[in-house]
């Protein structure tokens, strides 16, 4: 049963990989913005910070910062959140290899106390949580501004599209408008048609 499930997933993955391999580079830029919007820290105006348990997610963001924000990889810092029952040196080595970081890029690991009946990360496939940091007011502002601009633009486009559809829906002859979203002048003309006596 498990083997069939894995084979099915592999087939779906191959189809998705082929499709995604054709997307433009700007799509990866937007992907990084949305990743930070969902997982990144928003409390500091001067520090970029993102934490995750998935090494691929952390590696993606590390590469993204270098490629799209021109942040040197050796300028990034990382800190691990681990538990006392984990092999600290082994997990540090794991994350160092996963990210391609040097020893000097790691802060001292944060070791959480194990409370009674708490989650302890005993499974071998778990490696704790890795936080990646870069301190810069300029770069944090650039990242935040890009996210805000993307969200504002999307909401604006959605609003205009919705408004345009509403005008067409309520026009006397129910004619559909084909092509791009009408300009402000076009929408005003459509409003005149709607308001004119029949």
Image: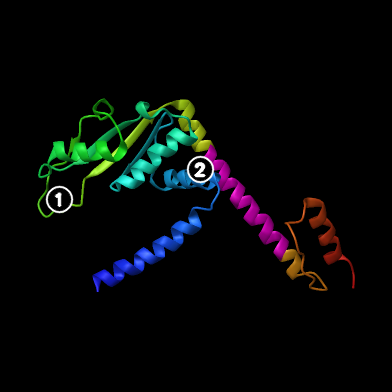
Mark sitting on residue 29 = 2
Q: Quadrant of the N terminus?
A: bottom left
Identify the residue shown where x is 26% and y is 38%: 97
Tell whether position 121 is magenta: no
Q: Which residues are magenta?
A: 146-165
Classified by dominant secondary structure, the portion drawn in magenta counts as helix
Residue 161 picture quarter: bottom right
Identify the residue shown where x is 45% and y is 45%: 37
Residue 51 picture quarter: top left
Extreme residue toward the right, this view: 197
In screen coordinates, is 90 left or right of 157? left
In screen coordinates, is 79 left or right of 44? left
Tell whether position 154 is magenta: yes
Give the image's coloring scheme. Answer: rainbow
Is the residue under label 1 in contact with that under label 2 (CB below 8 Å)?
Answer: no
**Vertical order, 9 against 47 (above or below):** below
Identify the residue shown where x is 65% and y is 56%: 159
Closer to the camera, 83 or 116? Answer: 83
In screen coordinates, is 90 left or right of 149? left
Residue 31 visible, this orientation: yes
Q: Secondary structure at mark 1?
A: loop
**Residue position marked by numbered label 1 in the rendering:** 120
How far is the residue under mark 2 from the one under mark 1? Answer: 35 Å
- Report the number of numbered marks: 2
């Amino acid at each position: 049963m498990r083997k069939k499930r894995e084979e099915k997933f592999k087939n779906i993955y191959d189809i998705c990989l082929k499709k995604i391999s054709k997307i433009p580079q700007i799509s990866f830029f937007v992907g990084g913005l949305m990743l930070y919007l969902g997982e990144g820290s928003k409390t500091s105006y001067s520090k970029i910070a993102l934490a995750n348990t998935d090494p691929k997610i952390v590696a993606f963001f590390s590469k993204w910062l270098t490629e799209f924000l021109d942040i040197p990889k050796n300028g990034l810092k990382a800190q691990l959140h681990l538990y006392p029952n984990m092999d600290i040196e082994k997990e540090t080595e794991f994350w160092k290899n996963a990210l391609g970081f040097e020893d000097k890029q790691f802060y001292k690991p944060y070791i959480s106390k194990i409370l009674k009946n708490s989650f302890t990360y005993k499974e071998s496939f778990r490696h704790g949580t890795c936080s990646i940091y870069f301190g810069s007011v300029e770069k944090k502002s650039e990242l935040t501004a890009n996210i805000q601009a993307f969200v504002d633009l999307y909401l604006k486009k959605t609003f205009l599209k919705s408004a345009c559809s509403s005008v067409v829906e309520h026009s006397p002859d129910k004619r559909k408008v084909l092509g791009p979203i009408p300009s402000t002048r076009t929408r005003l003309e459509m409003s005149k048609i709607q308001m004119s006596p029949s």
